Image (spheres, coloured by chain):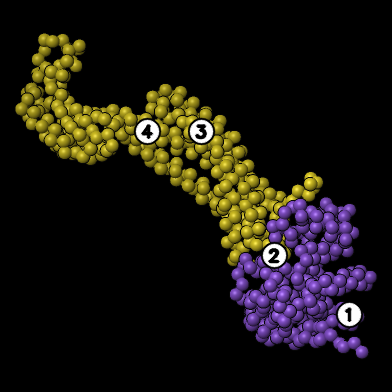
Chain colours: A purple, B yellow
């Protein structure tokens, strides 16, 4: 599976003439883009421009209505359900609204990506406990997610996204509902993950963020996406 | 590992509001299933018993023909007996036929009539002993009709005819009971199907999260299988708990009516074992039905 990682030339995500939308109407079309493994990208655009739509196609929940989408070198149009699930196991997602399983504990939520991969419970426990300490939630292991504060939920959501050490991490408006200080902390975390090799894609309309961190940008406007490289440091 | 860390299903049908309904409904179905199953097995045992009685031989009797003076027409009677004899010999499933001669009948009659009476002058029916092939069952209706065409004086031994009618009745009863069993099984499948689909729709959000995280359909379907297996086993046990006393009471009542017919209706130890393992059957049945419902539904849903 990770034979892909040895081939640095091959993009981790590649779109050729891709269109995506809802019920026959395309929100985005004519997309020609590729992302290199280990890259860090922002997805920007006005509200309603299609950031969430694009991301949900890239984390393999929506199919493109047109064109060729390659993820990890697999043409998504020719990938069956089982293999799609296997590809998704290599992807971490942080949603704007967290999307935790509220009736489950902090522990069970974070353990989820490991369990769907069939990891044994001992190893699951070891990894979850380690991560819980790191996000400073080890005192709330058994607490139900429905009773957590917004900031705690976000930490759990991030822990769940990174626990299986994904090859790609998507975050949709991760700084949307937190104050500047936490937003700053979060960004440092994403940068750290990127440094150890994770490809990171963050959708945001926070301009302060995109100007503060000099990464490449996928700009969504007039129904398509264009890639703008990071500015050269002067 | 800590008790709290014992993993929970991400999707637990048992906790949903509709699950109480499922528990109650499926318990009732399982009660019905077990009682009818017992009935099928009891009828089967009873029929087997009767059949043992019936096979082997039958008796055909030919009443003597009387002339205008109410005297026995020996010659005509003889002719009819021969016709019946020929007819019976050609019925498939009949091994041999022979006419019980008057001496035999005389022997049978002497205790009542004494030795001084000429038996030939009495209106005593001629008896034909018909030996049967044991493995072939006779069509009694056809024989009765055939005999009737030959002569209205010939008839098959009543007791056996009556038993045969009863056998037929038991056969239709059994078919009916089997139909009820199949219906219960089908209704259970439909109930599981619709409730699992409803639950999938209720849990669509969790399922989407599971999918995004990379869960296979199998992973989700197994959770449903676990939940429904639990419901199935529970319903099987509750149904059984109520069914066993019912079966015993019905059995006792049936036997105390005193008719020898029900003597063969007892359930064999094997039947009791079958009844006792119905919860295991319902467990696997619910599991498998839920599993495939969810697999198929997920493929259509998303
Ligand atoms: N489930 C849906 N069905 C139909 N149309 C949808 C659906 N979800 C989004 N859309 C439409 O697709 C367009 C793009 O929506 P999307 O959520 O991708 O925008 P966005 O860039 O993420 O916006 P925001 O910054 O507000 O999150 C919008 O016009 C929206 O109305
Ligand atoms: Mg959005």
Do the residues under discs 1 and 3 have CB atoms within 8 angstroms? Answer: no
**Residue B272 — which label?**
3
- Crowd tier of the residue under label 3, counting other residues whose Cα lies within 10 Å: few below 14, some 14–19, many 20 or above: few
Labels 3 and 2 positioned on one and the same chain: yes
Left or right: residue A125 versus residue A28 is right
* SS at badge 3: helix
Q: Position of residue B81 (x, y in %)?
A: 12, 30
Per the image, the residue denoted by label 4 is: B48
* SS at badge 1: loop
- Crowd tier of the residue under label 1, counting other residues whose Cα lies within 10 Å: few below 14, some 14–19, many 20 or above: few
Q: Chain of mark 3?
A: B
Q: Which quadrant of the structure image shows residue B292?
A: bottom right
Q: Position of residue B268 (x, y in %)?
A: 46, 31
Q: Residue at x 57, y 36 (%)?
A: B240
Labels 1 and 4 positioned on one and the same chain: no
Per the image, the residue denoted by label 1 is: A213
Q: Front-most of A64 and A24?
A: A64
| Alpha carbon separation for disc pair 4 and 2 | 58 Å
Q: Position of residue B16 (x, y in %)?
A: 70, 52
Number of labelled discs?
4
* SS at badge 4: helix
Left or right: residue B39 versus residue A223 is left
Q: Which callout, 4 or 2, points to the residue nearer the camera?
A: 2
- Whether residue B236 can be seen here: yes
| Alpha carbon separation for disc pair 3 and 2 | 46 Å
Q: Residue at x 87, y 88 (%)?
A: A232
- Crowd tier of the residue under label 2, counting other residues whose Cα lies within 10 Å: few below 14, some 14–19, many 20 or above: many
């Amino acid at each position: 599976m990770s034979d892909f990682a040895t081939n640095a030339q091959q993009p981790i995500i590649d779109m050729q003439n891709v269109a995506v939308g809802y019920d026959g109407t395309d929100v985005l079309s004519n997309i020609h883009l590729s992302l290199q493994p280990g890259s860090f990208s922002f997805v920007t655009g006005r509200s309603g421009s299609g950031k969430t739509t694009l991301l949900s196609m890239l984390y393999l929940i929506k199919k493109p209505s047109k064109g060729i989408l390659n993820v990890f070198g697999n043409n998504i149009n020719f990938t069956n359900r089982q293999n799609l699930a296997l590809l998704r196991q290599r992807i971490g997602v942080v949603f704007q609204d967290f999307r935790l399983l509220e009736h489950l504990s902090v522990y069970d939520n974070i353990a989820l990506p490991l369990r769907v991969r069939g990891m044994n419970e001992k190893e699951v426990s070891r990894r979850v406990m380690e991560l819980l300490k790191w996000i400073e939630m080890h005192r709330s292991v058994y607490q139900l997610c429905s009773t957590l504060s917004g900031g705690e939920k976000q930490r759990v959501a991030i822990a769940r996204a990174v626990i299986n050490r994904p090859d790609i991490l998507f975050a949709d408006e991760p700084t949307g509902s937190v104050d500047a200080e936490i937003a700053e902390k979060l960004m440092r975390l994403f940068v750290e993950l990127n440094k150890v090799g994770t490809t990171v894609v963050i959708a945001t309309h926070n301009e302060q963020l995109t100007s503060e961190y000099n990464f490449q940008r996928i700009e969504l406007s007039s129904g398509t996406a264009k890639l703008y490289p990071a500015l050269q440091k002067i | 590992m800590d008790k709290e860390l014992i993993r929970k299903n991400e999707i637990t049908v048992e906790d949903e509001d509709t699950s109480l309904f499922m528990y109650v409904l499926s318990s009732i179905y399982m009660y019905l299933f077990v009682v009818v199953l017992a009935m099928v097995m009891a009828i089967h045992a009873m029929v087997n018993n009767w059949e043992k009685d019936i096979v082997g031989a039958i008796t055909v009797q030919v009443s003597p023909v009387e002339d205008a003076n109410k005297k026995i027409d020996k010659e005509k009677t003889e002719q009819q007996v021969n016709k019946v004899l020929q007819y019976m010999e050609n019925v498939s499933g009949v091994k041999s036929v022979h006419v019980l001669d008057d001496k035999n009948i005389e022997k049978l009659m002497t205790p009542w009539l004494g030795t001084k009476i000429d038996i030939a002058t009495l209106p005593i029916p001629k008896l034909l002993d018909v030996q049967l092939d044991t493995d072939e069952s006779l069509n009694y209706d056809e024989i009765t009709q055939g005999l009737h065409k030959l002569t209205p004086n010939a008839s098959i031994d009543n007791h056996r005819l009556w038993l045969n009618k009863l056998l037929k009745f038991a056969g239709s009863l059994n078919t009916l009971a089997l139909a009820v069993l199949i219906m219960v099984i089908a209704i259970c499948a439909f109930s599981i199907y619709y409730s699992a689909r409803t639950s999938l729709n209720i849990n669509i959000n969790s399922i989407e999260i599971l999918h995004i995280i990379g869960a296979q359909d199998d992973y989700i379907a197994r959770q449903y299988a676990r939940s429904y297996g639990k419901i199935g086993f529970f319903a099987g046990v509750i149904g059984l708990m109520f069914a066993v006393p019912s079966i015993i009471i019905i059995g006792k009542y049936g036997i105390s009516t005193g008719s020898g017919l029900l003597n063969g209706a007892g359930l064999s130890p094997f039947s009791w074992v079958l009844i006792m393992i119905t919860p295991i059957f319902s467990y696997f049945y619910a599991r498998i039905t839920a599993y495939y419902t969810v697999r198929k539904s997920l493929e259509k849903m998303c």
